Every structure is written in structure tokens, then in C-alpha cells.
Image: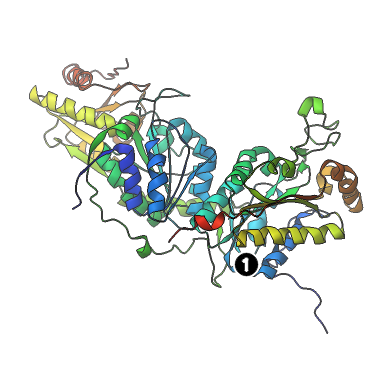
Amino acid sequence: MSEKKLMKGNEALAEGALRAGCRFFAGYPITPQNEVPEYMSWRLPQVGGAFVQSESEVAAINMIYGAAATGKRTMTSSSSPGISLKQEGISYCAGADLPFLIANVMRGGPGLGNIAGAQGDYWQSTRGGGHGDYRLFVMAPNGANEMGNFPHKCYEVAFKYRIPALMLADGIIGQMMEPVEFTNAEIDIKTLKEPDWALGVNNGRAKRIVKSYDLREGCLEKMVLERVKRYRQIEENEVLYEERMIEDAELAIVAYGTSARVSMAAVKMAREKGLKVGLFRPITLWPYPKKRLVELSGKIKKFLTVEMSLGQMVEDVRLSLNGRSEVYLHSKPGGSVITAEEVLATIEGVMKKGAKEYAAIK
Amino acid sequence: MQLLNKRPESLLDVKMHYCPGCGHGTIHRLIAEAMDELGIRGRAIGIAPVGCAVFADVYFNCDMIQGAHGRGPAEATGLKRAKPETIVFSYQGDGDLASIGMAEIVHAAIRSENITVIFVNNAIYGMTGGQMAPTTLIGQKATTCVEGRTAKQAGYPIKMCELLATVEGAAYLERTSVHNVPGVIKTKAAIKKAFQNQMDCKGFSMVEILSMCPTNWGTRLDNPSEATKYVAEGMLPVFPLGVYKNAAKTVGESRSLGV
């Protein structure tokens, strides 16, 4: 066990990635994720890694495309508008089966929006984001501690299945200071085996090619379908979620990240009032914990999705449950923070009135 | 019997897709010969662009990566910084390097990335069918300026060697041409120097090579000398050949990953 350290979420993320073996970072300044490149700029050289402040988000993701092709553990981070700029490159990485870590410390949108924490990039993160058929492995930390500990899992999954991994945080999680305990053993990169697709010094082996294209008839289809097999394995093996007070719950809140923290406070307030409410927190947003939601629908008939976006994740809840239980939505867009009191009011409304659609959009 | 010439080891024996009279095949061979002579094939990584040379990943006999349009210098940055022991070259056309990828090439030079860039300037978009390029000459016809490029409508052709010569981080810049034999010989020497610079950790090196595109220029395919004449009479006055920068910069060694 390592000691607990008081850290900012963004710093914990950077340190966590480094402990998970990250040795190359490229990024461009954007609020509220600036602590990540700032931390990496002095910390990476200490462990023999390389840091590049790129000329743009576009350049950063393409530096990752090159660096990740060498089989090293690499990372870039940004916030919503910057992640939009990276999408072409993310699509190339997905199409070339390159594993790396990308962090989106979300802010309010669309457009320039604002710099407050928000969750409006859920669709972009879980539906691919860029062009073409592809997925990202997406993890949603709920605070500084998970910011520090999730990179380990992201790299593990990314390299096992050759898929880019995305950590979807927000400005609140990135900026908050909390005790962080790095629970994963620090990875000694000398023990990491060089992947059999990595570019580099060839020592007489056959040449290797990293690419996302194939113009020959039917060949791209084969490439995509081979990848989809790995997606199915990820859906089978890598789903993560957390349940709180769910055993006797009559209503389950479904929320991730900051919304899950606020929702947990609302759950406690509801319990004090004698309302049987629990929290279901998806930790992986793709793959989404569909099967578990279906299992829970056997006894829970009301699900309330709470999100800092205009009803994005609620679509996954509805798709998972497919009419098995009632699904309600409490949403708030534009970088405004949901309060526990607001969520409690919605809980009471849903449990007492049972309205078919209870959207609390302020 | 004496063997006078053979295919370079760095070039694979595969059928190329280039049009008759195109300069890419010649330039590929020069790069391959340079890699052979410098003994770097085993640690070379080439970057194939978007454009006519997109299939270069198939032709060269070394590790290759095909990336996004214009981002070769960024990809090269990632490759070289992650694996400094390799020799990285980015192969780019004029639309790729001087239009959509203008920021990446300028900033790779600013950071003096220890990479080699081969910039093929044929003053037109080839793969997409002959649209106006940033290097298209005034008066030159293209599918998006059918009466010929005018400065009034589209401004002037960009001169990349001259532009990058103002950047302190650029170590070596030379413009050559493959429209005649002396030009081909000079081009090979320049490519070799651009690789040697990287081996010596001298920083950013780029060779701009004026080349032919008979298909999209509308010159006769059965008479390649029409296209080479266009290089000599049309392009050379706008893009003068020569060394634009030859500095003794040494920044590469400090960038090694200790892993």
C-alpha cells in the first residue's frame, strides 16, 4: 500500500498514467485540463520519457499516432473542444489498432461553451466520435483517486485488445483536490514486452506496416470485422460498475462521474426519508453494463438517470432495459452542477407521482 | 557477365501504381539507394502520406506507417521521440505539406525535430484529380481553376524552402529537381545528406523536389519531355534550385529516451 497524497484530479491522472508506464505525452493547453501537460512536462523527463507541447490538438493526436506505433505507452489529454479537434486522429488510431490513453476533462458545450465541468461529450465518447465504425474503451472516474488509478486498467485493456482507451472526466473532477492512494503496483516498463506489431529497429525481421486503409475490394470489411471480434470480447470481459444501496432499492439512480457523487448524496437524503433508493454507477461507459441493468430490472421497476447533459446516457439505459422498467431523466446541461436537493426532488416526484417522463431541465 | 545495376534492397519488387512520366518512382528509388548506401534500412521508419504516395508503405522495404493528411511531421515527431534510435522520414506532397499540413511542417522545423522530410512538389493535387495546389503556378490550369490560377482569385504559390529558411530550428533545406539527369544526381545527394543529418542528430532536414505530373498537368503521356520541359521552363523560375539552409545544429542527442 502506498501512502495517501493530497492531489488535484488532473495531477493524479498524470502521475497515475506515468506509474502505469506512460513514457510519451503530447498535448496542447486548454482549460480545465492544463495540470496534465504541466505535470507531464517536468515529471516525464525524470523517468526518461518524452514530453511535447504540440502546436495544436490535431498535431498532438498525430504525434500519438506515431509514438503509439512504436509500442510504447503514450498519452494525450484535452477538454471538449480539443477532443473534437482530435477526432480524425483518434479514428486513425482506432483504424490502425493502436493502443494509447486519451483523457477528456469535459467542459460545458457546444462550441466554446464554458470551462465548468459538464458531461455533454457522452455520445462523442461512447459512439466513436470520429468517422467510421469503431469503439473506444471508456472509463469514467468519479474523483481524484480514480483519476490516479484508472490509467492502469486503461493501458491493460488498450494493449490487450489493441484499442484506444479514453478516460472521461470533467472539470470538477480534474480540479478537485482529494486524498489519492495509488493502489496499483508501479509498472516497470522494462518488464513490458514489445508488441509484435511495434515499429522500430527491425534486426532482420520482416517489415511492419501500421495503417488504417485498405483499398482492395472486401479487405477493409475484413479488417473491421476482425476488430469487431475484439470489441465483442471487451463487452464480455471488461465491464465495470459500482452499486450502492441497491439490494432493497425500489428506484435506482444511474449516474457516472460527478453526477454519481451528487446522486449518492441524494440517495442518502432519500434513505433518511425512508425512500428505498440506490445508486448504479457505470464505471465503463463503453462497454456499457447492459447485462447488469437487465438483471436489476427483475426487481427494480424505476430507473432515474442523472446526468450533466441533455439526456445522452439515458439512451443507453433505455437501450439496455428495452422497456423492462420505467426510465426517468434528471438532466442539466451547460456546465451547471446538479445539486443533491434537486435530485432528491426528482426522486420524490418519480416515486410518488410515477410520471412517465420526469425531466428536470432548468 | 558484370552486374551494373540492381534494385536497391530498400525498395521492394512490387508493381507501382504511378502514372507514366510521374516523378515519384524515381524519387522512391533515390530514397532507397540512399538508405542502402547509409546502411539504415534496418532502423528506418517511413511515413506514407495521403495523396499519390499513399501506397509508399507497400513499396519501401522498411517499417512504414500511413497516416493522416498533412500530419507526417507530427507522426514523425512521435515516432522519433519515442524511438530515437530509429531513422524517421516523412514523404509528402505539396497539398499535404504546404496546405493542410502547413502548421505541422513549420512547427516540426521550429522544434528542430531530428527527422528527414522528402517534399515532392509537382504543383498540383494528383490523387484527387488535378485540383489547384498551394504551389500551383500563376496561369497553371487545374480542375478548380480551369482558366489558370490567378493571384486575384487564389493568391501566389508558396515557396516552402524560402519560408522555412526563416525558422531557426531548420538545419538543412535544399530544393532540387528530378526533371533531368543532373537534377536526379543532385537530388540523391541531397536526400543522402538529409538522412546523414539525422544520423548526426543535426535536427530538421527537408529536401524539396520539383517533380512531374503529366496526367494532371495535361501534358502528353506519350511524350514525357513535355512535362520535364514544364518543370524547366515553368517551375524553375518560380522555385529556384539550391541550398536554402545548411546549419550545424545539434539538438537530437539531448532527446533520447532512456528506455
Q: Would you say residue B128 is visible in this rendering?
A: no
Residue ID at (83%, 29%): B150
- What is the secondary structure assignment of the residue under circle 1? helix
User: Could you tell whether B33 is left or right of A78 in the image?
Assistant: right
Residues packed near mark 1 inside 10 Å, few (<14), some (14 to 19) or many (20 plus) = many
**Considering depth in this image, is B154 or B117 the residue closer to the camera?**
B117
Q: Would you say residue A279 is visible in this rendering?
A: yes
Residue at mark 1:
B41
Q: How is the image coloured?
A: rainbow
Establish if A199 lies above or below B4: above
Establish if A149 lies above or below A362: below
Give coordinates of residue B163: x percent, y percent: 71, 40
Q: Quadrant of the C terminus of chain A?
A: top left
User: Could you tell whether B40 is left or right of A65 in the image?
Assistant: right
**Considering depth in this image, is B193 or A152 the residue closer to the camera?**
B193
Q: How many marks?
A: 1
Give coordinates of residue B222: x percent, y percent: 90, 53
Establish if A97 lies above or below A191: above
**Considering depth in this image, is A74 or A131 the residue closer to the camera?**
A74
Q: Quadrant of residue A179?
A: top left
Residue ID at (81%, 28%): B151
Q: Quadrant of residue B34?
A: bottom right
Give coordinates of residue A97: x percent, y percent: 48, 52
Q: Chain of mark 1?
A: B
Give coordinates of residue A358: x percent, y percent: 27, 18
Q: Which residue is at the far bottom?
A: B1
What residue type is disc 1 on? Arg
